[in-house]
Amino acid sequence: MVSCGQYPSRAVTGEALTVRATVFREGHDAVACNVAVTGPDGTAQPFLRMAPDDTEPDIWWAVWSPDAEGLWSFVVEGWSDPLGTWWHDAPLKVEAGVDVDVMLEEGARLYERAAKGLPKTIDKKGRSAVTGLADVLRDSTRDPVERLRSAMADDVVALLTEHPLREMVTPGETRQVWVDRQRALYGAWYEFVPRSEGAFVPADGGPMRSGTFRTAMERLPAVAGMGFDVVYLPPVHPIGEVNRKGPNSPEFPGGKPIDIGPHDPGSPWAIGSRDGGHDAVHPDLGTIEDFDAFVEESRRLGMEVALDLALQCAPDHPWALEHPEWFTTRADGTIAYAENPPKKYQDIYPLNFDNDPDGLYAEVLRVVRYWVGHGVKIFRVDNPHTKPLQFWEWLIAQVKATDPDVLFLAEAFTRPAMMHELGRIGFTQSYTYFTWRTGKTELQEYVEELVEASDYMRPNFFVNTPDILHASLQYGGPPMFKIRAVLAAMLAPTYGVYAGFELYEHVAVKPGSEEYQNSEKYVYRPRDWSKPEQSLAPYLTMLNRVRREHPATHWLRNVRFHEVDSDSVLAWSKQLGDDIVLTVVNLDSHGAREATVRIDLPSLGFDWSDGLVVHDEVTGADYHWGASNYVRLDPFVEPAHVFTVRRSTA
């Protein structure tokens, strides 16, 4: 339950959901229980009988698997089990010769009642067989013990266990589960800025020109070839001209812009101009038909497009001109621009949801549905923590009521309580603090914290973003890019990279900053993809292949950390049935580390004495491992083992 049942818990289609409940009653008669499940369309699902837990008294459980997207509900029903009571008491008394006739008559009456309650799906023969057992129990010409054994044949008990005779049915509270498609849980994201793909300097030496959706489409086969599932595009809308920012000027000293040329493209997050707002595409990128072609080509290659939903406006956005009430007006009559001290974003006006909530809510819903109509089923939401929670709860519910396959990723690097609440109220996924977790202990503790919240908050581990170039990448060298990729891809079911990561882009605008030099937020940044031998692309391809081939990596709750006698080496496994992936990473990108990895074999279903064959997906080598194993990881050779595991037959 999420917040004591205030919000639905989360699942994906095909997920095995375990429902557990405490069920008990007075006296010595048998108690039983079931889960009654209702699908999103209001159809009741088949009866799910619960089983007692072998290790915990009074705890019962059942497993069900939702097969459709939408809001499911379930309720646990406890009840008196008269047949269970009789099946327990009758053998004791009849075989001891105590109250024989009474016990057999009580059984006969129970079977008659049970036959009447069998569902219509049970054929006449099966129904008659149960009714006939009442006659068997009353047949005084036969031995009482034989009559009892006939009435308690395995097939009879199985039928009436599946379709029980229930008395004093006592339902608990109705609970809800929101079920998403599987992309909500698992996927590899690739972020790139369309205007940079195909950007060029004209032959006459003029200013650089923007790439288009059509030129950006030429990059899609390479992205698909690396095994990515989602292509994430920052805002593709017209960009404001007022207070437009240029290269390396994320803020204006003294409130005035610097180094702004007439051909600087500006930040895609400064949305809106005379060319349109949130429901338009930038003219330099092409037309809405070109956008549709980009979406269709992504789909053809097995990917889908995620689009940025940034609810903010440039000063010359149509909303700023037509609806000034949707913004905050300062005492001097000016509209307040965005600030995140010491950063100032004079090219962006935040929206104010208090003055005209009905009008603004309706307009944002219209915009989201517009893009859904153009094939966008994933939205990366910019800074959702700066908007009212009740707005997001309303908007997501409205969208999912008509399009339950739409997913929302919360880009909220903010207080933990807010990040968790965004997950509770409906966001499908969340950015995390992974980018800043680099040490062994903090990584392990953070992942374990996310596991605890996994019933409502699904993490997306981005290794970098246009805003975040962590110091570890600035100074860790190429080995650190591998290390962070392995951590993200093998720890989290969903992870992402921002274009340029595979080219080891690592130069910051100044020491101590996480802003890229010549940030793509403010300039065109065409890249040379023609030298795969100098790229991390083959490594990312390998990681994504392992993830696709091994379903154990698609989950978060199954992560198990294993003991390592080095503060620089982290080891963990993920298991789903017989599928086991074991990862060992040297977190130090500057030097080789030696360590002993102690595998908790019983947690993986092995005995302590069992041997394992571990196949390194990075190098192709096989090793024979046991409970205690020596590793040496040189980051300049390979900083990580990504093992698939099987039992040794030797």
Image: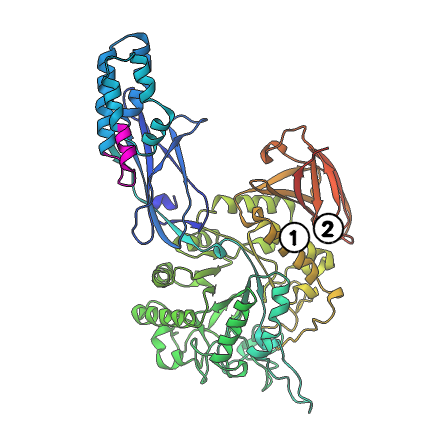
Left or right? Give the position of 535 relative to 138: right
Which type of secondary structure does the marked residue at label 2 adopt? loop
- Location of residue 171 in the rendering, given as x and y in whole percent from the top left corner: 27, 37
- Location of residue 403 in the rendering, given as x and y in whole percent from the top left corner: 38, 63
Inspect the image, locate mark 2, and give the three-letter code of the amino acid beneath it: Pro
Report the residue at 24% width, 28% height from top: 131
- Packing grade of label 1 (10 A; few <14, some 14-19, many >=20) is many
Q: Say whether residue 250 is magenta.
A: no
Is residue 645 or residue 472 the one in the foreground?
A: 645
Q: Quadrant of the C terminus?
A: top right
Is residue 151 or residue 255 the one in the foreground?
A: 151
**The quarter of the displayed image where residue 317 is located:** bottom left
Q: Say whether residue 122 is magenta.
A: yes
Labels 1 & 2 near each other (Cβ < 8 A) = yes
Residue 273 seen in this snapshot: yes
What range of the chain is rendered magenta?
Answer: 117-130
For disc 2, the marked residue is 639
- Packing grade of label 2 (10 A; few <14, some 14-19, many >=20) is many
Report the residue at 57% width, 46% height from top: 552
106 relative to 484, above or below: above
In the rendered structure, which disc, 1 or 2, sits on the residue that comes first in sequence? Answer: 1
334 relative to 223, above or below: below
Report the residue at 30% width, 11% height from top: 143
